[in-house]
Amino acid sequence: MYKLLLCLRYLRTRYIALASIISVMLGVATMIVVNAVMSGFATEMENRIHGILSDVVLETRSLSGELDDQRHKEAILEVAGDAVEAMTTTVVVPAMLSFRYGENWINRQVQLIGIDENTVCGVSDFAKYLQHPENRRQPSFFLHERGYDVRDPLGGPDAPLRPQMASAGWEHRRRMARLQALEQRWKQAEGGHPGQGTALAGAAPHEPVPHDPFAQHRPEEAQFDPARQQHPGAILGLILATYRTPGSAEDHFLLLPGDDVTVTFPNAPQGDPPKIISRNFTVVDFYQCKMSEYDSSFVFVPMRTLQELRGMIDPASGLARFNSIQIKLKPGQDGEKVRDRLRAAFDPRFYVIQTWRDKQGPLLAAVQMETAILNVLLFLIIAVSGFGILAIFFMIVVEKTRDIGILKSLGASAWGVMGIFLGYGLSLGVVGSGVGMVLGLHVAWHINDVADWLGRLTGKPVFDPSVYYFYRIPAQVNPATVAWIVLGAVGIAVLASVLPALRAAMLRPVESLRYE
Amino acid sequence: MAAAVVAEDPVRAISAAIELEAVGLKKTFRKGSVDIPVLKGATLAVGQGEFLAIVGQSGSGKSTLLHLLGTLDAPDEGEIRLRGRRIDNLPANQRDALRNRHFGMIFQFYHLLPELTTLENVLVPLMIGRSVWHYLRHRRRYQRRARELLELVGLAARLKHKPRELSGGEMQRAAIARALVAGPQILLADEPTGNLDQHTGKEILEILAALNRHQKLTIVMVTHDPGIAARADRVVRLADGRLDCP
C-alpha cells in the first residue's frame, strides 16, 4: 500500500519526472501517427492495386498471344475450378497514342489493352474508376451525350472540380466537328486556287470538297461524319489526357470525351516481323484509379476490335488469340496456392502466372520495408527516453536516500523499496504512453487538419496533392499496433527503472539515517 | 530497587523479565583504509517496561548501538536477543517484520516522509506491515487508531499538514505516533530532543515518560545530555566502546 501511495505522491511532486513522461509521450504519439499514415498508405495502395489487377493473372509470354481463350479458361477451371469465381480475357500490347492539341501533335507511349467490357467488371474494379456514372454501372465503348462527372468520383469533398468535363460528350464532338470543317475550308481557301479568292464567302456549307484527294480514293472515309459518328471507343488513363501545374491538384484537360485520338501499335502476324498499324479511336471516357503508373499508361479499347485490327483472328477457324486471362477467386481463397496449381499445369515457356501481389511485389515490399525501418528508428526514440528515465531515477534515488532509510527502519523490505521505484517507472510509462496514445490517436484521426494547420503555419503545404494522387492523407489506426507500441513503451520505462530500483533496494538504512 | 539488582549482575539478575539484551557487541567501521572500532564488546540488558537511557559523547557509538538493537545493522561480533531469542542473525524478511511490529523508532531529525501528510506518515508502518487488501479493508479502523495516537501526542489539529508545515516539536510528536501505531513493545529513541529547544524537548520527554508509565512501553533512549537522561529509570554510560552502569 505504501508503495502505491508513494508512487502516486512521487508522480505528483517530482516535476523532473515530467520530462521523461513527455519524452515517452512524444515517442509513443509519433510512432502511432507514423504507423497510422504508413498503413493507411499501404492499405490504400494495396486496395487500388488489387482493384486494378485481378487476384491471379495468366499471361502469354508472346505479344502475339495464344490461340483460343475459351480452351484456356476450360483448362484453368479444370485445375482450379473450385477457387475461381470469374475470368476475363484481355489483349495487351504496347502502343503509341497521338492526338492534336492546338497546332501540335502530342505522342505518348501507352499500354493498349483490349477488354471485354461485359466480363471485366466481374474480376476487377475497372468500372469504379470511370468518370461517367452510367459507365460505372456498366462500362460501354459508346460516347455518351453528356453527364460526365465534374466532381472527381473518388476525390472526396476536397478535390477541385473539373468544369471542362461538363461539356464533354457528343456535344463536344459536334462542336469540334464544326470547327474542323471550318478550318478545313479555310485552308483550301488560302492554299488552293489564287483565282477564287472570294470562294470562301460563296461556298455553300454542304458542298462536297472537290479537291480532296482522299475523298475519291477512300469513299467510306468521306462518308464518316464526325458530328454523328464515332470511331471505336477508347477509355484513356486520365493522366494521358491532362496535365497539372506544380502545387495544385487541378487537372487541366488536353482531351475530352468526344475527341479523336490515333493509336499506333504492332500487329500480331504469325511468321512475319510485326508491322505497324495506326487507327483512329474516339475517347469515350477516362480511367482514373489514382495509381499514376496506371493512369498515365493505360488505354482501354474493345477487345474484339483490337483482335481484328492486329490480325489475331485465325481466318480458318474464327478463333481469336489473346494475351492474358484475369482470374478472380472466390472469397477466402489463397491466391498463391491457386497460382502454384496453375503454374504446374501451364507450360512456363509460354505462360507467366502471377498474383496481383507478385505483379506489384517491389512496390509493396518497399512500403513494408519503409514502415519497418521507421518503426525501428522511432522505437529508438522511446529507448532514448528510457535512458532519460534511468538518469532521472538515479537522481531521485540519491535524493530519496533518507526516505528509503526511514522506510527500511519502519520495516519495509528491500523488495518493497525496489517495488516503489519499479512501480514509479511503471506509472511513468503508463501515464506517458497513455497520454501519448491519446495524442497520437487524436493526431492520426485528424491528420489532415494537422497537416493543413502546419501548412498555414509554414506557408508551404505539407501534403502536396500534385505529387500523390490522394487529396487527403490516408490514415488507418491498427489497434494491435497501438497496443504493441504502448506495451513496448511501458516495458522500456519499467526496464529503465530496474537499475535505480535495485540500487535503492541495496541501500543500507543506517548510512542514510545517521546524518541530516 | 531495580537499578540496585541490575548493578550486581546485569544479565542474570533480571533475566526473567528481560525484554531485550545485547551480549558482547562489536562493530568496526572502515573509513578508507583505517578501521575505526566503535563498539568493543558492549553488553546490555533492558527489562520489560523499563525506561533506559544510554548517555555518551557524540561519536561514542550510541546511535550505532541503537541501530544494532533495532536490527537496522548487523554486529561484527556478539548477539542481540529479544526475550531470549537471538534476532541479529534472522533472515532479512523476519528482521523487517520485527522492525515493523516489535520496534518503534524515533530519530533526532524526526525522519518523516516529506511527500505525505501527518496522518499518512503515521499510517505508513501499518501499510508496510499489511497487504494492500488487508489494509484497505481495515482502513477505517487504522485511520481511527492513527488519529487517536495523534490526539494522544497532541497533534489532532495537524492531520492534513505536510511535515514542512510543522514545527520541530510537532514533527517529533508525529514521529512518536508513527513509532507507536503498529503496537510495538520497544521504543528506540535516538536523541529525540537533540534538535529541539529545552521547553519542547521537555514536552517530548513527558510524552515518552507517560507512555512508559501508563502503557508499560519499554524505552531505550540515547542522548548526550545527562540532564535528559535523568528522566529515565536507569542510565548507562557508553564510553570507549563499552557500557558501564553507574
Image (tube, coloured by chain):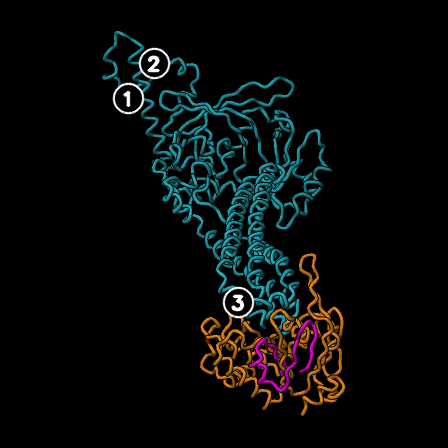
Chain colours: A cyan, B orange
Q: Chain of mark 2?
A: A
Q: Marks 1 and 2, how far apart in space? A: 13 Å
**Which numbered tag is attached to residue A205?**
1
Q: Chain of mark 3?
A: A
Residue at disc 2, secondary structure: loop
Q: What residue is shown with label 3?
A: A8
To the question of a shared chain for discs 1 and 3, the answer is yes
- What amino acid type is highlighted by mark number 1? Pro
- What amino acid type is highlighted by mark number 2? Pro
User: Residue B192 at what x, y percent from top left?
Assistant: 56, 77
User: Residue A488 at what x, y percent from top left?
Assistant: 60, 54
Q: Residue at x 61, y 72 (%)?
A: B57
Residue at disc 1, secondary structure: loop
- What amino acid type is highlighted by mark number 3? Leu
User: Residue B4 at what x, y percent from top left?
Assistant: 69, 89
**Marks 2 and 3: in contact by CB < 8 Å?**
no
To the question of a shared chain for discs 3 and 2, the answer is yes
Q: Marks 3 and 2, how far apart in space? A: 100 Å
Residues shaded magenta: B217-246
Q: What residue is shown with label 2?
A: A210
Q: Chain of mark 1?
A: A
Q: Quadrant of the C terminus of chain A?
A: bottom right
Q: Marks 1 and 3, how far apart in space? A: 94 Å
Q: A335 or B80: which is nearer to us?
A: B80
Picture layout, residue A489 above or below residue A207: below
Assess disc 1: are there few (<14), some (14-19) or many (≥20) residues with their C-alpha within 10 Å of its C-alpha.
few
The reply to whether the magenta stretch includes residue B241 is yes
